[in-house]
Structures are given as structure tokens and as C-alpha cells.
Image (cartoon, helix red, strand yellow):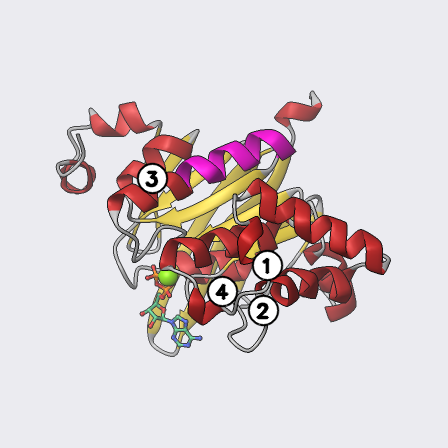
Amino acid sequence: MTQSNSVLIDVEQVWKSFGDLDVLKGISLRVHDGSSDVILGRSGIGKSVLLKSIVGLLIPERGHIDVMGHSVIGMKTRELNRLRKNIGYVFQYAALYDSLTVRENLEFPLRKHTDASESDITDRVLEQLRLVGLTDAIDKMPSELSGGMKKRIGLARAIIKRPKIVLYDEPTAGLDPITAREISELILSLEEQFGITSITVTHDLECARIIANQIYILDDGVFQHSGTYDELKASSDPYTRAFFQVAT
Ligand SMILES: Nc1ncnc2c1ncn2[C@@H]1O[C@H](COP(=O)(O)OP(=O)(O)O)[C@@H](O)[C@H]1O
Ligand SMILES: [Mg+2]
């Protein structure tokens, strides 16, 4: 098997419930090195639960999750922290610390997870801001930024450690269509530049069209359908059609 074909994230038959609520019901997903996979599904269907399970923030009752060859379920905290150094996570809500400046928000993961020197940290922060086109915002507080700028800083922070894998939870939610498109294009460009493998959870079809190699449709605890954007757009399945009828 060639390197580019290797599986970086392997989710097998995973079950996760909260009390009586079965959210994931034997879900499986394989993400190959270099791929950008997108999960579509309506609100409350379990998209965030799946991402959190992949990084060990939630523990499924059954199944297997392998990330870069390491089994995540049952992994000890220390090992989990080591694995998380290779994973960037763009959270659905409140990506930035409100009481810290942009610079401090970006420095945080480097101080926490690396032993980079002060000058390296400064250089890296400036480089990240250049990559997302926000050098001028370095001393601003999050409250001074627009929604689109906050998302850009969130992306910059997620990739500042140069992770192999990035998980994006609704990266364009709450943005106007033009800004959303800019963010999707930025995600694509950063992934190409740094060879990132990613899973993106969204209900923004334009985002899926721009970044997805493969799209999975989550419903009733499993992926009901998968394919490229064009394949799913041409699908005759009613649930898939309901998703795509608004797309052009
Ligand atoms: N920590 C939790 N405790 C209890 N219920 C939860 C928890 N996290 C998620 N849920 C429930 O699981 C379901 C799926 O949630 P989620 O994955 O956040 O949906 P979405 O697809 O919108 O991201 C929802 O009904 C949610 O209320
Ligand atoms: Mg969610």
C-alpha cells in the first residue's frame, strides 16, 4: 500500500448513546491520507459527537477508532495528548478565548504543546496571520473582529502546530455566503499547502462542493449515502435530494 493510500482515521462500527438517545449506531468511516472528507447532516444528528469521539473527547460504548494507527477508545490521557498534537480542531462555537488578544490566542497551542522558543513562537504567529491575511489584527481582541475574521483566526490556530489532521466543525456557520465561500477556499488552500487530511462537518453545500473529495450523509446514526459532490447531486435518493435541491 502506498503512503498516499494509507488510512489515517479509521472509525469502525461505533456506537454512542446518551441515556436513551442512540446517536451513533454502528457508524464506520475511513479517511485516507491527504483526503478532505465532508459530513453532511441536519442539526442534532450526531456530527459533532462523531468528531469529538475521534479525538477522544467523548467515549463510545462500542466499536473501534484508530487515528494514525493508534486506538483512541480507552487511550490514556497522556497518550491522547500526544496524539492530539497531530490533530487540529476547529470547534463549532467560541473558537477563541475572549480575554486573550489574537496574538495570545495563537501562541496558546504552541506554549501548551511544544517547547518552541520565544522567537520561534513570534515568527510562527506572524506566519500564521500572513497565511490567513490578518497580520493587522495581531493586537486586537476577539470582540473587535468580524465573524469571518474570527473564523480565520480559528483556522490559523488549528494549524499552527502543523497537524497532519484537522477536524472542522461547521467552519462556515453563521457567515454570509460570500465570507463563507472565502473561508472554504482558505481551508482548501491551507490543506493543499500543508498536506492536511481533514474531516469537515457542515450543512453548507457550497463548502462541501469546494473542499470535499468525498461526502458522507449522516442520518439515523450511520452514513446513509456517500459519494463525490457530483455523484450525490445526481442521486435519486429522496433524503440526498432534499439536501441538494437548494444547491446549484
Ligand atoms: N454530552 C452530551 N450529553 C448528552 N447529550 C448529548 C451530548 N452531546 C450531544 N448530545 C446529543 O446528541 C445528539 C447529537 O448531537 P450533535 O452531535 O452535537 O449534533 P450535530 O449533528 O448538530 O453536531 C443531540 O441530540 C445532542 O443533544
Ligand atoms: Mg454540531
Provide residue 15's location: percent of width, then percent of height.
46, 60
**Numbered badge on residue 138:** 1
Nearest to N terminus: mark 1 or mark 2: 2
Q: CA distance from mark 2 to mark 3?
A: 26 Å
Which residue type carries mark 4?
Ala
Give the CA distance from mark 1 to mark 2: 7 Å
Say which amino acid is labelled 2.
Thr
Query: Which of disc 4 and disc 3 is earlier in sequence?
Result: 4
Label 4 close to label 2 by CB (< 8 Å) = no
Residue 151, how many percent across, how many down?
Answer: 44, 55
- Which residue is identified by label 3? 181
The amino acid type, in three-letter code, at marker 3 is Arg
Structural crowding at the residue carrying mark 3, measured as other residues with C-alpha within 10 Å and reported as few (<14), some (14–19) or many (≥20): some
Residue toward you, 16 or 102? 102
Please, what secondary structure does the residue beneath circle 1 have? Answer: loop
Residue located 53% across and 57% down the image:
137
- Magenta range: 184-195
Q: Residue 222: within the magenta? A: no
Q: Position of residue 160 (x, y in %)?
A: 66, 50
Residue assigned mark 2? 101
